Image (cartoon, rainbow, N blue to C red):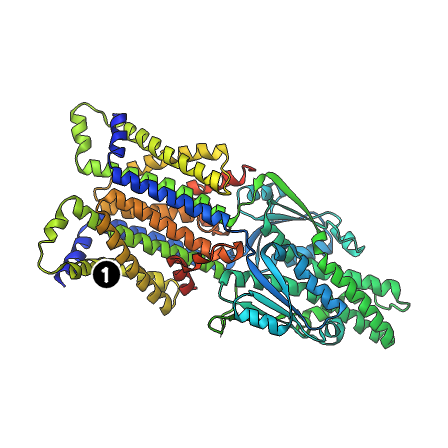
Amino acid sequence: MSRFILRLKICLKDRTAGICYAVSVIVMFALLMGLSSVAEERSAVPVGLFVADDSEEAALLAEKIRNTPSLYVYEESLDDLKELLLDGYVNSIFIVEEGYGDRVRNKDVDDLVTVISGKDDQMSVMISDIVAGAMMYEICLNKSYRLYKDSLPTNALDKQQYSDYIRKLYDSNDFAFNFEAVYKDPKVKKIEERQVTNGMIYKQMIAGMLAMLLCLMAFVSCNCFCMEYENGVAYRLESFPGSGIPKEIMDFLGIFMYTLPLSIVAGLLFADIKAVIASIVYLLILCAVCTFISKAVKKTESYQLVGAVLVIGLGVLGFVSVFSGLIGGPEFLKYTPNAIYINLLV
Amino acid sequence: MFSKDIKLIFSDRKMLILLLFLVLLCAAGIFFCVNDTDRPAATLGIVDEDQTKHSALLATYFDENEVFTSYFTVLRGTREEMEEKFEKGELDIYVVLHKGFTEKLVGLENTPIKTVINSTDKTKMVLLDNLMKAYSDYITAVEINCQGLADIMRAEGYDRATVNDRNVTISYDLLFTALGKDDFFKRETIDRFEGISLINYYVYSGIILLILYGGLFAGLKVLKEKLGQVGVRLRSTGVSGVRYYGSSLCAFMLVYGSIMAVSMLAVILLGDLKVPPKALIFIMGAIAVSCVIFMFISRFINSVSGYMILGNMLILFTTIAGGGIIPIMYLPEGCAVVARFTPTYWFIKLILNSGI
């Protein structure tokens, strides 16, 4: 136990390190909390919208696009929107072309909206499908009205009356077509109870950042072992009574205790006891691994090098794992440490 | 002085072997990840129990939709077959067009289509949910207009046969319109503006991380020399501070620049990554700036542990705020302002605008 307290004292005695630890952690948590608070809003895909037509139909389409939850709409001049696209702030630009209203009324539906995007950008194709959903109502309304007007002898309703009736149906919940979606995990036969939102992807990214933060803290905290080897203190500490392995365990537990508050706060960011436990367990494992590496490497520079690759490697693999299902990434990514941590948190 | 610095860096052989091993490991990892993305990402099952012209038409939406076909393999079969495949984890989603679907669609009853989505992969689940919602907008528009026309015709006294006839005509026309939705859009691309795949995005972000860590490492060397009074001793022999730091900077730039150049060459030759000449110049500049910043920070800190905590956290902060983890477009607007002061932002922008 004395070794455990000694290790904790050594960690806490370095005031410069303590101040750096506190400042860094506060700044990082402020950033992560900021990201967490806008997860739902900012997980929508940012697009530019420019309406070049002043018809009622074009205004209706613009309103629908603005109200689509999966899109975050920027409306500025075309030049400004192009600038945003080139700067990487929007994925694509949708231009509702001049004459949109007239052409929808005349059932001419080709090239109604121009989409500007980067070369080979698949995401803009997906967004077009969402925008098409917003366009469909007006297009279908005009087509059905034209059939009513042109092919029936008694067509008592004018366009406004016809539209009003269709709108009444649209607004009534009875006719809102929906998929009866069930989200099920075939491995454990469990049905997902939570509401599925775009924010889930954003939260996975935040969990990935927390995993990287925990990894970094475990890694930098264990650097003290290398420094002790370099200045000879480690050999003097070996003269303390007690056998090797319990001493090593006490050393590692001392480091774990030093970094423990960070894991608790990390878990609390997700306001879930499961997240707190997952963070503590993950930090415990990382501290054990980093203690082992630092005692094996013994030199600060080498340890920094191995640690940097460990942190970057685990971090990148964790983030890629979030999207590996979509990009056909290797199966093993799901079983990397950060990926498991992300999966436990979200 | 410069050659002495180079010698000092190369004096630790074990360290160099370790460095070489880690560089090769990174290159192999990137090569493996970039090249193992050809297989279909996901599988979608369709059960057409209705077996009508309309249901067949709707099912083709999945076969012919560019989004689905670029990411998913589409399978067709009976409900039992799809359930079995789903339980085995071979399907990510299956959609059931139930018996009587067409009859209900053209204006008699509103019954939802059953879809079962695999929840193991959260990202895929969210994406599928979004696609299904967009799809439901199409069906809602078709269904409401079919229903509306039928209601109005009945109210105006048309007989059942005429109502049914117009209903079939309009539903078929509207379904075709929904399926041909790609024609609504005229696509334009900006030639010099490139879309980056997700894996490559993280690889580019990883390159900047390595550059920043290079700087951190240079700062660590300088800090340790400072703690060992090397600078003081050199000054007593007439070596100025500017010469001492300048020489260290040049040595680190040469060594890191060479390592980065070899790694980039390996990745470009072995993988799918494209790096324009401008980006290579940027990388060299970024190595210099990163080394200068970290060497500067190391002047004000006297604790190796403190320096490592601060340096590592600064790197993580820079990477997050620069859009290295969550792409810049999804970051809050405040972060987007900070991003302009980070190398990650400028590097990704340079790649996006290079038109490679």
Judge whether residue A147 can be spotted in this image.
yes
Judge whether residue A38 can be spotted in this image.
no
Q: Residue at x 53, y 61 (%)?
A: B124
Q: Position of residue A308 (x, y in %)?
A: 33, 47
Residue that label 1 marks: A257
Image quadrant for the N terminus of chain B? top left
The extreme right residue here reads A153
Q: Position of residue A222 (x, y in %)?
A: 24, 52
Task: Looking at the picture, tell me which residue is in the foreground, B275 or B342.
Answer: B275
Image quadrant for the C terminus of chain B? top right
Task: Looking at the picture, tell me which residue is in the foreground, A188 or A143.
Answer: A188
Q: Position of residue B321 (x, y in %)?
A: 42, 48
**Residue B212, quarter of the rendered image:** top left
Mark 1 nearby-residue class (10 Å; few <14, some 14–19, many ≥20): some
**Residue B150, quarter of the rendered image:** bottom right
Which kind of residue does numbered mark 1 sit on? Met
Residue B149 relative to residue B321: left or right? right
Instruction: In the rendered view, tell whether residue A305 sits above or below residue B278.
Output: below
Residue B351 relative to residue B114: left or right? left
Q: Position of residue A118 (x, y in %)?
A: 59, 44
Task: Looking at the picture, tell me which residue is in the foreground, A155 or B123.
Answer: B123
Q: Chain of mark 1?
A: A
SS for tag 1?
Answer: helix
Q: Residue at x 31, y 64 (%)?
A: A281
Task: Looking at the picture, tell me which residue is in the foreground, B202 or B40.
Answer: B40
